[in-house]
Image: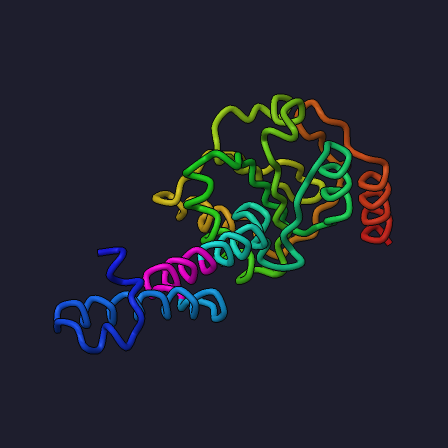
């Protein structure tokens, strides 16, 4: 057959129909091969679709990494992240007579993550309250001094009254936080020396602020 295909075209034209069709088929194959060398072959639809899917997945992964982690989100200026004992004491000292709610949480804690959106909503509803977020793993010595043993855990502080109460709370028992806010977030004028916070010492700024409040109220 290979020898027959090498025959001149004028012989092929006068040969049998079978030989003529075989030659035409071979010429067609050669023309396709030559055209593929000069013009890029079309990409199959399957591979094009797969490429688009992979591209969208890559973009989605990049978008996810750009988003802040759940514990990095804050409700507003009245919600602050605490990274050290000094920051914690300074925040309490600068809060003055504001009610301060401290949340002790863990990034791995499922209950902390479930409760956090509702805590942010509460912070947005009470701009007069200062919310402090303390990462347990970053502040283990301080959490141990404050007797934090379960997560999430909450402390309530206010001015010269020091720590008002503390308790653990989950999303199902979030009403405990609302009740504590209703109890302690009232208008008051506290006078007297500031109280300690567990085994932690209050900063000088806190003491100075309280002494100034006492002096102004006695006049």
Residue 171: % across, % down: 39, 45
Q: Is residue 40 magenta?
A: no
Q: Nearer the viewer, residue 29 or 129?
A: 29
Q: Nearer the viewer, residue 21 or 175?
A: 21
Q: Does residue 132 sit above or below 18 in this rendering?
A: above
Q: Residue at x 86, y 42 (%)?
A: 208
Q: Residue at x 19, y 72 (%)?
A: 20
- On-image quarter of the C terminus: bottom right
Residue 210: % across, % down: 80, 44
Q: Is residue 53 magenta?
A: yes
Q: Nearer the viewer, residue 196 or 214?
A: 196
Magenta range:
43-56
Q: How many numbered marks are there?
A: 0
Q: Residue at x 66, y 45 (%)?
A: 81
Q: Is residue 132 left or right of residue 175?
A: right
Q: Does residue 142 sit above or below 119 in this rendering?
A: above
**Residue that lies at the very extreme toward the left in this rendered image:** 17
Most common secondary structure along the magenta stretch = helix
Q: Residue at x 56, y 54 (%)?
A: 67
């Amino acid at each position: 057959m290979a020898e027959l295909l090498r025959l001149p075209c004028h012989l092929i034209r006068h040969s049998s129909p079978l030989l003529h069709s075989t030659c035409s088929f071979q010429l067609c194959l050669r023309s396709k091969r030559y055209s593929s060398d000069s013009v890029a072959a079309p990409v199959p639809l399957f591979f094009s679709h797969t490429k688009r899917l992979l591209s969208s997945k890559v973009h989605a992964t990049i978008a996810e990494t750009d988003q802040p982690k759940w514990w990095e989100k804050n409700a507003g200026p009245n919600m602050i992240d605490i990274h050290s004992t000094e920051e914690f004491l300074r925040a309490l000292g600068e809060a003055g007579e504001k009610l301060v709610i401290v949340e002790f949480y863990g990034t791995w804690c499922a209950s902390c993550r479930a409760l956090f959106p509702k805590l942010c909503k509460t912070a947005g509803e009470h701009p007069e309250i200062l919310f402090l977020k303390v990462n347990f793993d970053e502040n283990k010595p301080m959490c141990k001094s404050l007797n934090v043993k379960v997560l999430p855990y909450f402390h309530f502080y206010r001015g010269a009254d020091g720590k008002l109460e503390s308790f653990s709370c989950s999303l199902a028992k979030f009403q405990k936080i609302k009740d504590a806010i209703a109890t302690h977030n009232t208008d008051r004028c506290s006078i007297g020396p500031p109280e300690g916070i567990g085994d932690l010492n209050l900063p000088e700024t806190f003491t100075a602020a309280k002494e100034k409040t006492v002096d102004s109220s006695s006049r």
